[in-house]
Amino acid sequence: MTTETVEQRLGPYVEHLGLQFGQVGPDRVVATWAARGDLLQPHGILHGGVHCAVVESVASVAADRWLGDRGTVVGVSNTTDFYAPVTAANGRLTSTAVPIHRGATQQVWAVETQDAAGNLVARGQVRLQNLR
């Protein structure tokens, strides 16, 4: 999977989220995106489900890249914590995935999301099953 084809391979939902993958490797994946108006909840802040979807998407790309042609991965658990409200004024967001555990049957990845000022706004952890 090349960085040029990541968004296309993940399909229309990831495209709707606006994820742009800048760094894609087996040890780290970085994606940028924005809190657009259509992703906000009625109080004008980013919907928590969007954070969860971004966390799982970025972790899945990382886990897939690490597993390579040895199989495929599916998410089985996603826990995401929100530390600061995000509005459209926060600018570009950056979500970075790093591995916590990579084993024969499962992987666990941590994903941190920072706003344009470098503030941590959310952190998630995804457990993925390796299917061979």
Image (cartoon, rainbow, N blue to C red):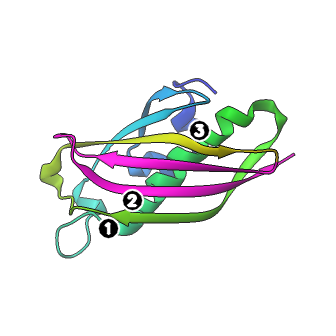
In percent of width and height, residue 126 lies at 57, 56
Q: Is residue 12 visible?
A: no
Q: Of the residues under marks 2 and 3, which one precedes in the sequence?
A: 2
Q: Residues within 10 Å of mark 1 (few under 14, many from 20)?
A: some
Three-letter code, disc 2 = His
Q: Nearer the viewer, residue 37 or 56?
A: 56
Q: Is residue 125 left or right of residue 50?
A: right
Q: Left or right? Give the position of 106 relative to 41.
A: right
Q: Magenta stretch: give its range.
A: 105-132
Categorize mark 2 by other alpha carbons within 10 Å: few (<14), some (14-19), many (20+). Answer: many
Is 37 within the magenta? Answer: no
In the rendered image, which residue does mark 3 sit on? 62
Q: Looking at the image, which residue sits at the far front?
A: 100
Q: CA distance from mark 1 to mark 2?
A: 7 Å
SS state under label 3:
helix
Residue at x-position 55% and y-position 64%: 78
Mark 2 lies on a secondary structure that is helix
Foreground: 89 or 82? 82
Residue 48 percent across, percent down from the top left: 36, 68
Query: In this figure, which residue is indicated by the disc labeled 2?
Result: 51
Q: Dot 3: within a 10 Å radius of its alpha carbon, few (fewer than 14), some, or many (20 or more) residues?
A: many
Mark 1, residue position: 47
Image quadrant where one finds the N terminus? top right
Residue 125 located within the stretch drawn in magenta: yes
The alpha-carbon separation of the residues under discs 3 and 1 comes to 23 Å
Residue type indicated by callout 1: His
Instruction: Kindly check if marks 1 and 2 are in contact, taking CB atoms under 8 A apart as contact.
Output: yes
Three-letter residue code for mark 3: Ala
Q: How far across and how far down the image is residue 99, in percent?
A: 57, 41
